[in-house]
Image (tube, rainbow, N blue to C red):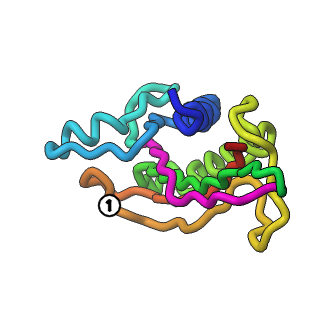
Amino acid sequence: MSRLDTLRSAIVQTLNNVPQIGRVHDRERSLADEAAQRALFVYDLPGGGQQLRGWWLRRTATEERSVNAAGRAMSVDTWTVHGYLAFDDAAATELVFDALIEDIRDAVRADPTFGGACASGPLTDDKRTDGVQVDGTGLVTFCGVRCHGVALQLRTWRYL
């Protein structure tokens, strides 16, 4: 397993530790059959019933940086986590979804190295951000279902 794969697995594990997160995938999932696709994201609710509630992870960018004159380099990876939760006005699902987003942000803030899978950051740079950034939210159609959708971004640092 590469160090990137180890880091990807550690991020997924952190997400899976968020209570009632739903189904978490380490990559974008796409099946030709919409019902089969939906089955990948259906979550069994604690009180009974099911809900489309799922997440997937993608590395969206990598920057390689020289750390010092001795030739040590660092990889700065940008990750996007896409999330979906079926819309239900009566159940105030927008509030549930916002709470899940905040729980994810808290989990990453509590362990920004994902159990030592990466270095702590940020390095001094023009993107002085830490933790999980909420890149956009809104209503979307996912697997034929009206859902709340979000794109979350985070950056990780690892020595090469």
Residue at position x 56%, y 39% from top? 4
Which stretch did the figure color magenta? Answer: 53-68
* Extreme residue in the left direction: 33
Tell me the kind of residue under disc 1: Thr
Seen in the picture, residue 82 relative to 2 is either above or below; the reply is below
Q: Secondary structure at mark 1?
A: strand
Residue 118 painted magenta: no
Residue at position x 59%, y 34% from top? 3
The residue nearer to you, when weighing 136 against 158, is 158
Residue 19 seen in the figure: no
Q: Is residue 83 left or right of residue 76?
A: left
Q: Could you tell me residue 79's position as x and y percent?
A: 57, 53
Q: Is residue 92 left or right of residue 39?
A: right
- Residue placed under numbered mark 1 in the picture: 141
Total numbered labels: 1
Seen in the picture, residue 59 relative to 63 is either above or below; the reply is above
Q: Magenta residues: mostly which secondary structure?
A: strand
* Extreme residue in the front direction: 70
The quadrant of the picture occupied by the C terminus is: top right
Residue 66 painted magenta: yes
Q: Could you tell me residue 136's position as x and y percent?
A: 55, 68
The residue nearer to you, when weighing 2 against 28, is 2
Q: Could you tell me residue 155's position as x and y percent?
A: 67, 54
